[in-house]
């Protein structure tokens, strides 16, 4: 009842990883594919066909279907170069690239800092800071066993 009054419904936005998309399609879940084709906005994260042209066909089919239905809100992410998107099939790769060029806006993040590396560096920094804090704490309390089980010298 509460959701009925909202302008956007839960199925208006679908976020799915590429691996999950392939599983949905191969599992012949027609209802899931219908939802992907008709949702207002669809995000498909981390396209990586790993040399399997059948996986590229899935993305191509979905793009074509959404194009036919006038569903412009399609977002694809990948860290692959366009030449690698065909899954080893050069003609299929060109077809996918052509469809993407017609229906999508390409945003190239290759000259941007890698978010994963930035986060990893922050996490490592936090761990190092915590280790330093514990070492200092142990040095001020000789013979104390801290929470991680290290006994300080003393």
Image (cartoon, rainbow, N blue to C red):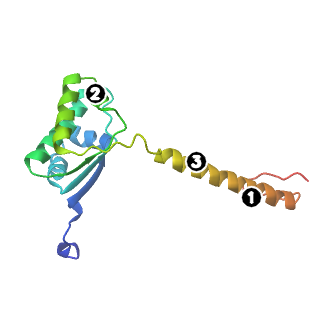
Tag 1 residue: 133
Residue furthest left in the image: 68
In the rendered image, is residue 33 in sight?
Answer: yes
- From mark 2 to mark 1, how far is it between C-alphas? 49 Å
Would you identify the image quadrant in which residue 56 lies? top left
**Between 113 and 32, the one nearer to me in the picture:** 113
Quarter of the image that includes the C terminus: bottom right
Q: Helix, strand or loop at disc 2? A: loop
* Vertical order, 21 against 35 (above or below): above
Tag 2 residue: 87
Would you identify the image quadrant in which residue 25 lies? top left
Residue at figure coordinates x 18%, y 37% from the top left: 60
Q: Helix, strand or loop at disc 1? A: helix
Query: Residues at badges 3 and 1 in contact (C-beta under 8 Å)?
Result: no
* Vertical order, 20 against 154 (above or below): above
Tag 3 residue: 121
Q: Position of residue 72 (x, y in %)?
A: 16, 52
Q: Position of residue 104 (x, y in %)?
A: 21, 45
Q: Helix, strand or loop at disc 3? A: helix
- From mark 3 to mark 2, how far is it between C-alphas? 32 Å
Q: Earlier in the sequence, mark 3 or mark 1?
A: 3
């Amino acid at each position: 009842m509460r959701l009925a009054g909202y302008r956007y419904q839960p199925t208006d936005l679908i976020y799915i990883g590429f691996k999950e998309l392939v599983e949905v399609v191969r599992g012949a879940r027609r209802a899931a594919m219908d939802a992907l084709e008709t949702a207002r906005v669809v995000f498909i994260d981390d396209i990586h066909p790993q040399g399997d042209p059948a996986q590229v066909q899935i993305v191509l089919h979905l793009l074509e279907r959404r194009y036919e239905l006038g569903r412009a809100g399609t977002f694809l992410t990948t860290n692959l170069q366009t030449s690698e998107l065909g899954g080893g099939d050069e003609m299929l790769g060109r077809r996918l690239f052509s469809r993407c060029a017609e229906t999508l806006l390409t945003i190239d993040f290759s000259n941007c800092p890698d978010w994963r590396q930035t986060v990893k560096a922050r996490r490592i920094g936090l761990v190092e800071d915590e280790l330093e804090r514990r070492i200092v704490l142990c040095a001020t309390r000789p013979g104390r066993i801290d929470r991680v089980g290290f006994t300080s010298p003393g």
